[in-house]
């Protein structure tokens, strides 16, 4: 299929990485981002071996690792006393000179990707959304919220779990659903002893993740009713209370550090998985717009990043939008369904909605799958 110009809706992790991947194929890229400030919240993200490999494929790995904390090991602790259950050493998929996994501040990740996408010639417009789209079979005419217009060979909806692009092209698609859990995150000073991610499973689901030489972040999950709202005032005390409920000593040891209401990043977990089409005509979706998982396997962003690489790869192969987008979805569906369904299953087991699961085994299976080529 001939694609000279693509519009990407959404300047998040999926949109930026898709932009880099499409530029590498010589395609002109315009990105629009709804948020005029392009705000990214201040905690970090876990990026596993398949993401390190993808960062290499995108040509940003060295820059990325200059901000990140690389590591090879993930340690799993279980039970109220935080008993060490298993240690996984992931393969170094980008080569022996690079770590298997990394933790990074989300702001730093965005900077690396935004610098790269503009360096390779994409344009990014902030504070802009799509008002209308008209696909006439040969191209898509778009009217933007700032009154400007444009015509594109394809439009890529990378606008997250509440995607407006999805609503426009697939109005009958499933809508996001709340799983019953919230996640609470907070940055902490880095102790010398944290040599990789520490995950705590069992009655409390929590973790400690190194992000750079100075900082780690803690996450803790809690079960909350559907209508739960968190007042900003008192957020730190609420997070301490949630973490103290069932946390093992390794998490409780940090609770006195959680003092600033403004630094608590807390949100409900909302999920979606589109098992039907991911496109209509010349408009296609990627990332959380089609498969938002819970963070139990820390693979949501990884799946969004891989989507962009596969989409760019398939554009060179098929003759029509239908061929290309169907092939793209077919390649992606097994991996993203595994991540979405397994993450949700772990959360449901934690809440007692389904029988207990072997988190170590599920993590092992996921790692083996993620190490496979995309
Ligand atoms: C608590 C939590 C922890 C997580 N931890 C991890 C982790 O450790 N590792 C991991 O791999 N993944 C993790 N994830 C998942 C990861 O954050 C997402 O999968 C990833 O951000 C998806 O990227 P995306 O670009 O598809 O969507 P988003 O990151 O949501 O980006 C969408 C972008 O589109 C913009 N936008 C929205 N609507 C419009 C519109 N109408 N017009 C223009 N722009 C628009 C938004 O402002 C945003 O910038 C976590 C998720 C949660 C909720």
Image (cartoon, rainbow, N blue to C red):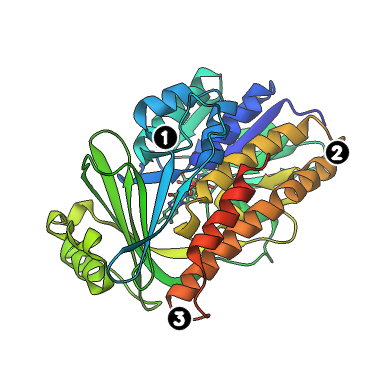
Of residues 345 and 38, the one nearer the viewer is 345
Q: Which residue is mark 3?
A: 352
Q: Is mark 1 within 8 Å of ligand 1?
A: no
Q: Is residue 90 visible?
A: yes
Is residue 205 rendered to the left or right of residue 315? left
Asked whether mark 2 lies closer than 8 Å to ligand 1, one says no
How far apart, in angstroms, are the residues tagged by discs 3 and 1? 36 Å
- Of the numbered discs 1 and 2, the one sitting upstream in the chain is 1
Q: Which residue is mark 2?
A: 320
Q: Earlier in the sequence, mark 3 or mark 1?
A: 1
Q: Residues within 10 Å of mark 1 (few under 14, many from 20)?
A: many
Identify which residue is drawn at 22% across, 39% down.
192
Disc on res. 110: 1
Pick the residue in front: 225 or 187. 187
Q: Measure the C-alpha gap from mark 1 to mark 2.
A: 32 Å
Q: In the rendered view, tell whether residue 267 sits above or below residue 19.
A: below
Label 3 CB less than 8 angstroms from ligand 1: no
Q: Residues within 10 Å of mark 2 (few under 14, many from 20)?
A: some
- Please tell me whether mark 3 or mark 2 is closer to you in this view: 3
Per the rendering, the mark at residue 249 is none
Q: How many marks?
A: 3
């Amino acid at each position: 299929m001939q694609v000279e110009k693509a519009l990407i809706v959404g300047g998040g992790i999926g949109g930026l990485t898709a932009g880099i991947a499409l530029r590498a194929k010589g395609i002109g890229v315009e990105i629009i981002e709804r948020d005029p400030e392009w705000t990214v919240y201040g905690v970090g993200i876990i990026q596993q071996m398949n993401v390190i490999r993808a960062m290499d494929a995108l040509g940003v790995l060295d820059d990325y690792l200059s901000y990140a904390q690389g590591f090879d090991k993930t340690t799993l602790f279980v039970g109220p006393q935080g008993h060490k259950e298993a240690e996984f050493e992931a393969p170094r998929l980008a080569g022996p000179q690079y770590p298997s996994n990394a933790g990074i501040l989300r702001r730093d990740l965005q900077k690396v990707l935004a610098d790269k996408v503009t360096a390779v010639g994409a344009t990014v417009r902030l504070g802009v959304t799509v008002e209308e789209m008209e696909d006439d079979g040969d191209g898509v005419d778009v009217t933007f919220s700032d009154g400007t217009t444009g015509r594109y060979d394809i439009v890529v909806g990378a606008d997250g779990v509440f995607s407006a692009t999805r609503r426009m092209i697939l109005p009958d698609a499933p809508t996001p659903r709340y799983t019953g859990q919230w996640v609470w995150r907070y940055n902490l000073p880095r102790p010398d002893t944290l040599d990789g991610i520490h995950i705590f499973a069992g009655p409390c689901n929590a973790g400690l993740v190194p992000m750079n030489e100075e900082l780690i972040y803690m996450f803790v999950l809690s079960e909350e009713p559907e209508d739960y709202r968190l007042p900003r005032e008192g957020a730190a005390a609420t997070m301490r209370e949630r973490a103290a409920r069932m946390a093992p000593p390794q998490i409780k040891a940090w609770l006195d550090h959680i003092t600033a209401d403004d630094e608590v990043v807390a949100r409900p977990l909302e999920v979606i998985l589109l098992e039907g089409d991911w496109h209509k005509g010349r408009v296609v979706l990627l990332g959380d717009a089609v498969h938002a998982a819970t963070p139990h396997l820390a693979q949501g962003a990884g799946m969004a990043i891989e989507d962009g690489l596969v989409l760019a790869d398939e554009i060179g192969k098929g003759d029509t939008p239908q061929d290309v987008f169907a092939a793209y979805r077919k390649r992606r569906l097994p991996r993203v369904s595994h991540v979405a369904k397994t993450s949700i299953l772990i959360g449901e087991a934690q809440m007692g909605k389904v029988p207990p699961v072997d988190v170590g085994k599920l993590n092992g299976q996921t790692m083996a799958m993620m190490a496979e080529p995309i």
